[in-house]
Amino acid sequence: MIAIDLGSNTLRLIAYDCASGKTISEFEKIVKTADGLAESQSINDEAVQRIIDALQEAKTKIDFTQHTVKAVTTEALRRATNAKEVLQKIEEETHIGFTVINGEEEAKLTLLAVKNRLKKLQYASESFVLVDIGGGSTELIFHFNNETITKSFPVGIVTIAQTYKTLKKIEDALLNEMLDIQMFCAEIYATKQKPDTFVATAGTPTTVAAMKLGFTYASYDPLKINGTTLQKNELDFYLKKLLSMPFEKREETVGTGRSDLIAAGILIYKQLFTLLEYESSIVVDDGLREGLALETCKKFLH
């Protein structure tokens, strides 16, 4: 089956074999769905065209006719006033119909993927907090033994970067922007306990982990990223390193047109370390698309 996740910044898809539980092939493209969304409240025509082009490109690399296709989209389309028209246009051009899922469903599917990956890494943690730092939203998922508490917040790397423009302004605004996250964490810590482990997924943590391991955007290897540990104090180091690179080198390292977003993401990630009171976190590449594949396969196999 093919699972597609159209995020606020990236289109990610995998062809997945339900019988063996293995990924056959994957495809990823920066489409900047949420470009300009903070100002206009809508998805612009250029972004729609980038999404259509990316899906057409994916079809040249993966044979869609051999697979069942499940496609979901998240915060940018939850927020956009023209979501219905956008999805209609994408379906007309590509014959792929997307479902807009809410933050809770997004968190549930991401958790499924991350738990599956942690199990493969033989990482037995009774409790963990998972953060998914997306382009338009950040999901927090507290997982305790048999209880999971999730919440989605409209703080994302694209919307924050486009609202505040400079890193200084982002840094100054983050405390206020992330106040609801702080209150949510405080409430969980007061009524439950602090989880054993801090797990992070999505573009920012995986990009910093890739820098740590010496990968570029082109040589990125998800299997090597999975299980990488990042320390809070390493974030300043990699942000400085990124900002000191010549523009071309920066684009090569983190991907074309991503460096301003990753810089904003690092500031959000760092703030999450502070709010959650951890000094280190485990990075997992698996996310929504893998969770969607696992969930769909479960239905096939029953």
Image (cartoon, helix red, strand yellow):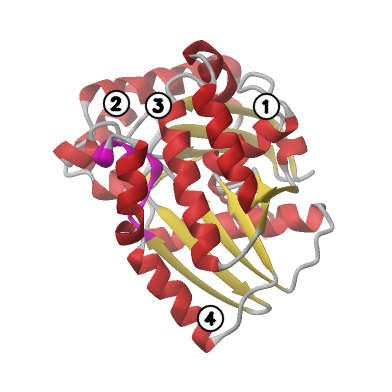
Label 1 to label 3: alpha-carbon separation: 18 Å
Residue under label 1, please give it.
Answer: 220
Going from the N terminus, do you reach mark 1 or mark 3 first? Answer: 3
Residue 45: x and y, percent? 22, 23
Residue 175 location, quadrant: bottom left
| Mark 3 residue crowding within 10 angstroms, few (<14) / some (14–19) / many (20+) | many
Residue 53 lies in what quarter of the image?
A: top left
Q: Based on the picture, tell me whether residue 137 belongs to the magenta stretch.
A: no
**Closer to the eye: label 4 or 2:** 4
Taking the view exactly as shown, the residue that stands out farthest to the top is 248
- Residue occupying the point 58% across, 61% down: 130
The amino acid pointed to by label 1 is Tyr
Crowding at dot 1, Cα within 10 Å, few <14 / some 14-19 / many 20+, comes out as some
Of circles 1 and 2, the one toward us is: 1
Q: Is residue 212 above or below residue 173?
A: above
CA distance separating discs 3 and 2: 8 Å
